[in-house]
Image (cartoon, rainbow, N blue to C red):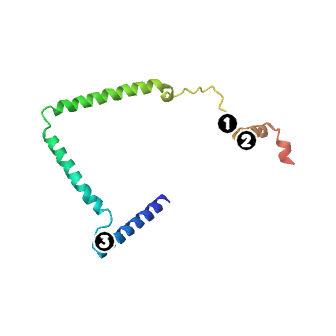
Amino acid sequence: MAAFVTFVVSLVLIISLFIMKGLEIYYGRKIFLENIFLRSDAGLFTAGLKIKYWWSHINFKNIRLIFFWIIVNIRKLVIITKRRFDHQQSHFFVKRDISPSKNKESVSFFLKNVSDYKKSLREGKGSDETRS
């Protein structure tokens, strides 16, 4: 069902894009989102120039040390977090030892009633009811 809804929505969007583009061509002017994109292009271009400028000032000689420092700190953080989680949730991850001598009872009341009925049939209590 979700795939069908996605298909219908995408089909409607594609049709609307074709209609909008047809109207743009017919009227000879830009109506859809193109005006907004043209206005934001100047801002994106200046942001790209700023990133390029700051990127050119980075010294790559010590980048290896910075990378290892980041990796070591992330590793320490993961170990500390794992220890805290294991300490707080240790009972969740420990498997319970099930005693084989423990009586295995039925999982639900319905199965318990069925097993009691079968046991009564085996013992002969229900044999009078089944023969008549």
Residue that badge 2 annotates: 114
What residue type is disc 1 on? Ser
- Using residue 47 as the reference point, say whether residue 20 is left or right of it: right
Q: Residue furthest bottom?
A: 26
- Using residue 77 as the reference point, say whether residue 98 is left or right of it: right
Q: Nearer the viewer, mark 1 or mark 3?
A: 3
- Residue 121 at x, y = what percent? 78, 40
Residue depicted at 16% across the width and 41% down the height: 54
Residue 24, label in figure = 3
Which one is nearer the viewer's eye here, 6 or 111?
6
Could you say whether the residue bearing mark 1 is in a helix, strand or loop?
loop
Q: Tell which circle, 3 or 2, labels the residue nearer the N-terminal end.
A: 3
What residue type is disc 2 on? Val
* Cβ atoms at labels 3 and 2 below 8 Å apart: no
- Using residue 88 as the reference point, say whether residue 24 is left or right of it: left
Task: Report which quarter residue 72 is drawn in.
Answer: top left
* 65 vs 31: above or below: above
How many marks on residues? 3
Which one is nearer the viewer's eye here, 130 or 10?
10
Residue depicted at 28% across the width and 62% down the height: 35
Mark 3 closeness class: few <14, some 14–19, many ≥20 residues within 10 Å: some
